Amino acid sequence: MKKIQLAKTGEMIPILGQGTWGIKNYRGKEYYENWKASLRKGIELGMTHIDTAEMYGSGTSEKIVGEILKEYPREDLFITTKLFPMHLRYKSMKKAAYKSIERLGIDQIDMYLIHWPSPIVSIKKQMKVLEYLVKEEKVRFIGVSNFSVEKFKKAQSYLNDVKLVNNQLNASIVRQKHVHESLPYYQTEGLTMTAYSPLGHQGLKNIKGELKEKLESVAKKYDATIQQIAIAWLINHENVITIPKAYKIEHVEANAKAADIKLTQDEIKLFYDLKKTK
Ligand code: NAP
């Protein structure tokens, strides 16, 4: 699995990781065992960056990821988790971070993100918490998610000694806004953009028209599926990593193979005129 440098940190991170949004609560043992088997398969195939969040299944996702973490040397996995942005106070934000650490069963989170800009909590306060957590060595790297470039810059301006390294954004072949409007900034600054929902959240089940035709034609050339081409399209952009979510093992296997597909510049641009600005 190809790795790229996470911003300018020296840390190498796989271009393909694994998402875990959608782990449900109150399911039987078999459901969780199947999910863990898929995560293990992904790890075996080099998708060692696992993305979770305090809010996924109200902590269930972090707990499952924590169970997986116990099975591997800690340094083999890179864990991203996210602060639910509705904790109002400095103290409650810190407490939330410690709870994530506890559920994950680790000493330190690799990358900690503010899940989305809060309408009620100041970015400044959130940045102070992130800075504190880095200084306390509870977190290695920090970033944000769902922040506009303007908000990202504002957040960075509140940090004294630490830098934001990542913005996790909704970006895919069916939702290209951030590829065209945000990514150029992160590329210029040498920062990393994580594309979330790389398969449009639905696994590209309902696509039609020109996009479907173009995907099918490129997929044919590479003997690939349209989902593999959609993933390859994202990670063929500089400074982009992505985190598809797959419960089915065959999907995990297919996704890992997408990392090997090298599209031409013309093939990348072929999809640009299908951009949607939402
Ligand atoms: P996604 O990865 O775009 O799509 C997931 C869907 O695609 C699932 O139904 C999955 O099916 C299917 N799939 C996966 N690989 C496939 C393949 N090779 N062929 C066909 N179908 C395939 O959706 P997502 O979960 O929204 O996004 C990925 C991750 O990004 C999340 O899990 C989460 O970690 C993160 N995320 C972050 C935010 C944020 O606000 N920061 C928001 C949304 C998501 P099966 O599961 O049945 O295998």
Image: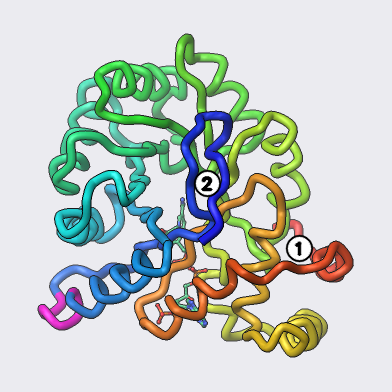
Question: Residue 71: percent from the left, percent from the top?
Answer: 17, 59
Indicate whether 266 appears above or below 158: below
Q: Is residue 193 left or right of residue 269?
A: left
Q: Residue at x 52, y 32 (%)?
A: 165
Instruction: Please say if the residues under marks 1 and 2 sit with CB atoms less than 8 Å apart.
Output: no
Q: Residues within 10 Å of mark 2 (few under 14, many from 20)?
A: many
Indicate whether 115 appears above or below 209: above
Question: Residue 40: percent from the left, percent from the top?
Answer: 29, 69
Question: Residue 199: percent from the left, percent from the top?
Answer: 57, 71
Q: Which three-letter amino acid code belongs to the residue tagged 2?
A: Gln
Residue 64 part of the magenta-drawn span: no
Query: Can you tell which quarter of the image residue 85 is in?
Result: top left
Q: Which residues are magenta?
A: 27-32
Disc 2 under 8 Å from ligand 1? The reply is yes
Residue 29 part of the magenta-drawn span: yes
Question: Residue 252: percent from the left, percent from the top?
Answer: 43, 76
Nearer to me, 12 or 60:
12
Nearer to me, 3 or 90:
3
Could you tell me which quadrant the C terminus lies in?
bottom right
Q: Of discs 1 and 2, which sits in the foreground?
A: 2
Colour style of the rendered protein structure: rainbow
Name which of mark 1 and mark 2 comes first in the sequence: 2
Q: Which residue is mark 1?
A: 276
Q: Is residue 23 left or right of residue 183?
A: left
Residue 168 marker: 2
Q: Which three-letter amino acid code belongs to the residue tagged 1?
A: Lys
Q: Secondary structure at mark 2?
A: strand
Q: Residue at x 64, y 63 (%)?
A: 172
Q: Residue at x 21, y 22 (%)?
A: 91
Q: CA distance from mark 1 to mark 2?
A: 19 Å
Q: Main secondary structure of the magenta part?
A: helix
